[in-house]
Amino acid sequence: MKTKNKQHIINVVTLGCSKNLVDSEKLMGQINANNFKVIHNSNDLKARTVVINTCGFIQDAKQESINTILEYVDAKQKGYIDHVFVMGCLSERYKSDLLKEIPEVDAIFGVNNLSDIVKALGGVYKKELIGERTITTPDHFAYLKISEGCDRTCAFCAIPIIRGKHISVAKEDVITEAKSLVSKGAKELILIAQDLTYYGIDIYKKQVLADLLKELSDIQGVEWIRLHYAYPASFPKEVLKVVRERENICNYLDIPFQHISSNVLKLMRRGVNSAQTYSLIDMFRDEVPALTLRTTLLTGHPGEEQKDFEELVEFVEKVKFERLGIFAYSEEEDTYAAKNYADSIPQNIKEERASRIMELQEQISYEKNQEKVGTTQKVLIDRQEEEFWVGRTEGDSPEVDNEVLITTEKKLSIGNFFNIEITGADSFDLFGKI
C-alpha cells in the first residue's frame, strides 16, 4: 500500500541492536534521497507515517517490538498518524502471525526488503546509493557493518534463521562507506557483524579481517576503530598484530564466549572447549597487553548443571574481564536447542545465576576502575549532561560500556578528544578533570 505523496515526514523507530540501527540509517538515506523528510525515534505527531524496525532476538526484545507496534497502531486508530509499517527481524520471522494478529498494520517487511519499503512509502529505490546513510548517532562516531547473516550453528541462536547465511560486504564497498562516514565527521568507526572473524571467507576464500583493518586504518581522519562481535572458534591471530601496531585501532575486542564449561560449550555447539578458550584469552593478553576485553555470557542453557555454573563463576573470577554482559537463556523457536533440548531449568534459577555473575563483575569492574585513578586518559567527548561532560576512553564503546564524567568550567567540544586526569571511580563510571 502506497502512502500519498503529501506524506513528507516519516518517523523511523529503531529497536534492537546496532546492526538494526544501520539498516534504519540506510532506509533513512533512501527516504531523504526521495525528498521526504525523515526523523528518527521521534514523538513528533507531524510525522503521519511510522516505520518500526523490530528486533526478534530474545523474548524480551520481541515483546518490546510487539508493544511498540501496538502503541503506534493505537495512535493510528485515534487519528494521530495515518500509516504504520513494520520491518526487521521480528517481521522476518513472524510475518504471517503479525498480519493475523495486528491487521491494522499497513504492510510488513522482512530484513532484506529495503526497495519494497521505499516503494511502499511512495519513493523510488536508488541503487546507486551504496553505503549512503542518514546517521542517527552523534556525528563523531558511526557503526560500520561489514557483513550480514551468520554461518555458525550455535544451538541457542536464531540469527541465522532470521538473517540468513553469512554475506561479506566487498572490501572496496566497506572502504567507500567508511570514507563517506569520515567525510561527514565520524572520527570513530565501530565495526559490527554477527561474526567479524568470518569476514571475507565467502568472497575471498579466506579470513581477511586483518587486511580490511589495515585499509581502514589508512583512511585520513579515522582516529578510533573498534571491533564488535568476534567469534572464538578459528580466531585469526593476525588481527591482533594489526591491533597492536596501528595506533588508531582501539585496544578493544568484543568477543562473546557464552560459557566456559566444555560440557555446556558442546551443547551450545560453539566449536571450542574450555582449554581452547583459556588459551585464546592468554593469546589476547600476550599479543595486546593493553587490550580491553569485553564478553557476553549465557546462563541457564539446557544441560547447564550447577557444577557447570560454578565453573563459569570461577572463569569470571580468573579472567577478570574489563567488560561483561550476561543473559538468561530464552528458548527460541526452530533453533537446534529448541528442537533437541528440554528447557528444564526454572526461570528463577537462570536469573539468579545471571545476577550472581553480574554482582561478581561489578566488583571486578570497580577494582579495575580504581586502578585508573590518578592516570591520564585520552577521552572522546560524547555529550553534555547536567553538570558533567560525558566521554569515553578507547576501552569503552557507546551505550554498553563505562563513561567518563568530567567536571570543568570550560566548554568542551563534543566529538573532540581531551586528556583527562581520572580523579575518582565507581563500578561503571570514571570521574575526571581536564
Image (spheres, grey):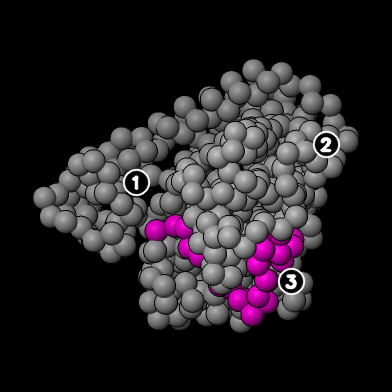
**Residue pictured at 50% horizontal, 34% vertical:** 317
Q: Which mark is residue 201?
A: 3
Q: Is residue 269 above or below residue 190?
A: above
**Residue pictured at 40% horizontal, 31% vertical:** 363
Which one is in front, 152 or 262?
A: 152
Q: How many residues crowd mark 1 within 10 Å: few (<14), some (14–19), many (20+)?
A: many
Q: For marks 3 and 2, give the CA distance.
A: 40 Å
Q: Mark 2 = which residue?
A: 100
Which one is in front, 349 or 44?
A: 44
Residue span colored magenta: 112-138
- Can you give x and y, in whole percent of width and height, for residue 107 in the image? 74, 49
**Residue pictured at 51% horizontal, 41% vertical:** 324
Q: Which quadrant would the C terminus be assigned to in this image?
A: bottom left
**Residue pictured at 40% horizontal, 81% vertical:** 220
Q: For marks 1 and 3, give the CA distance.
A: 36 Å
Residue 35 covered by magenta stretch: no
